[in-house]
Image (tube, grey):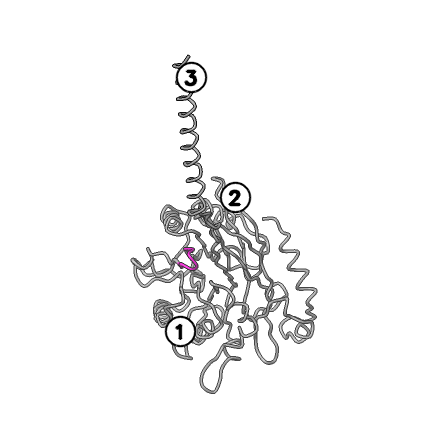
Amino acid sequence: MKNKRRIYALCALFSALVSIVLLCVLLGTQREKKENPQKTLPPEKPQTVTLCAVGDNLIHSPIYKKCKTADGYNFDCLYENIAPYIKKHDIAAINQETIFVQGEENFSGYPLFGTPKEVGESIVRAGFNVVTHATNHTYDKGKNALFYTMDFWDNYPCVSVLGLNKSEEAARKTEILNINGIKTALLNYTYGLNGHRLPSGEEYLINIFKRDEKTAAHIKNAKAAADICIVFIHYGTEYTHNPTKEQKADVEFLCENGADIIIGAHPHVIQPVTAYTSENQNKAVVFWSLGNFISNQDSTEKILGGMADITIEKKNGNAYVKSYKMLPTVTHADSGGYSAYLLSDYTDALAASHRRVPNLTVEKLNDLFCRVMAVTP
């Protein structure tokens, strides 16, 4: 009996010791948690880049003649009513339809355009930092004007000039803007040069669009080097609001090879904005045509332009188009000159003074915009 009582006493003592040890461990763990609480990382803040793009900056001769001053030329009036909005964006692009030339004797309008370089100076002051130069009029004045234009833009290293290349090496490079931690690749092509041919061996001077392996590789490499790939393309048929079969084939090619955003120019009228899925299930936002931004053209359809307004977001390492829309613009022309407006800022009083389009009203412009945006490509 004594042995049994001793065994029971030892077991009770052992159990008590174990309980004390477990209690100490538990209290120590709780104290450690209090002293070193588990840190909860805040959710990653999304990074964003805002982008706007406008259509054809088409400098007809009446425009540059109106912008002549006692000291030369100044084109600030073309953009002053829209510049505050342009400057709100991280990336602001304009399609410079016409090439710059040196000397007034070389200035000209349709069909072979030659534009004062002061247009470029006003573009920069307005807040544009991307200029697309690959258009059907880029070679209107030949190789000398091409190099004159590129030399001009060398004075503005903060402006990304697309579509023109001084060398084959430059043509192989992709312009990539790294803003707010988002890398955006920018490409620019034109369908052709109005029948003009680049010198043999110097085809690299202007980016000519072809649905071929070389162009596919160019787009794929741009996409691989960036978060978002944007292609500005000069294509389509003039004065049609409906994208053509050729445009659709071009968009399919661009999307399937990696373009995330496609922005079109050349038709001189607006076309719709759509979300596009290629046959290989790639996706892109397509602004089929932004129409004219500045021109001397003379109908409601030709003075109504579009501004792409896009927000790109990057979260958890993935970039995507968060939002997009087209804002209507108007090329105003009266006895005082020319200027671009957002349609939201345009008034019937201004419309009544338009000297190129009779009986113009804001309602007519709004109705046309809504009808075109409802088009299904």
Tell me residue 130's x, y (percent): 44, 64
Q: Which residue does the image show at 54% across and 71% down from the upper left?
A: 84
As drawn, which residue projects farthest toward the front?
2
- Can the viewer see residue 187 in this picture? no
As drawn, which residue projects farthest toward the bottom?
70
Mark on residue 101? Answer: 1
| Callout 2 secondary element | strand
The alpha-carbon separation of the residues under discs 2 and 3 comes to 85 Å
Q: Which residue does the image show at 43% across and 28% down from the upper left?
A: 16
Q: Is the magenta stretch mostly helix, strand or loop?
A: strand
Tell me residue 327's x, y (percent): 59, 61
Badge 1: residue crowd in 10 Å (few <14, some 14–19, many ≥20):
many
- Amino acid type of the residue that numbered disc 2 sits on in the rendered structure: Thr
- Examine the rendered structure and indicate whether residue 236 appears above or below residue 98: above
Numbered circles on residues, count: 3
- Examine the rendered structure and indicate whether residue 357 appears above or below residue 372: below
- Examine the rendered structure and indicate whether residue 332 appears above or below residue 290: below
Mark on residue 277? Answer: 2
Viewer-nearest of discs 2 and 3: 3
* Residue 1 image-quadrant placement: top left
- Amino acid type of the residue that numbered disc 1 sits on in the rendered structure: Val
Badge 3: residue crowd in 10 Å (few <14, some 14–19, many ≥20):
few
- Asked if marks 2 and 3 touch (Cβ < 8 Å), the reply is no
- Amino acid type of the residue that numbered disc 3 sits on in the rendered structure: Arg
The alpha-carbon separation of the residues under discs 3 and 1 comes to 113 Å
The alpha-carbon separation of the residues under discs 2 and 1 comes to 41 Å
Tell me residue 72's x, y (percent): 45, 83
Give the extent of the magenta segment: 177-183
Q: Which residue does the image show at 50% across and 64% down from the upper left?
A: 89
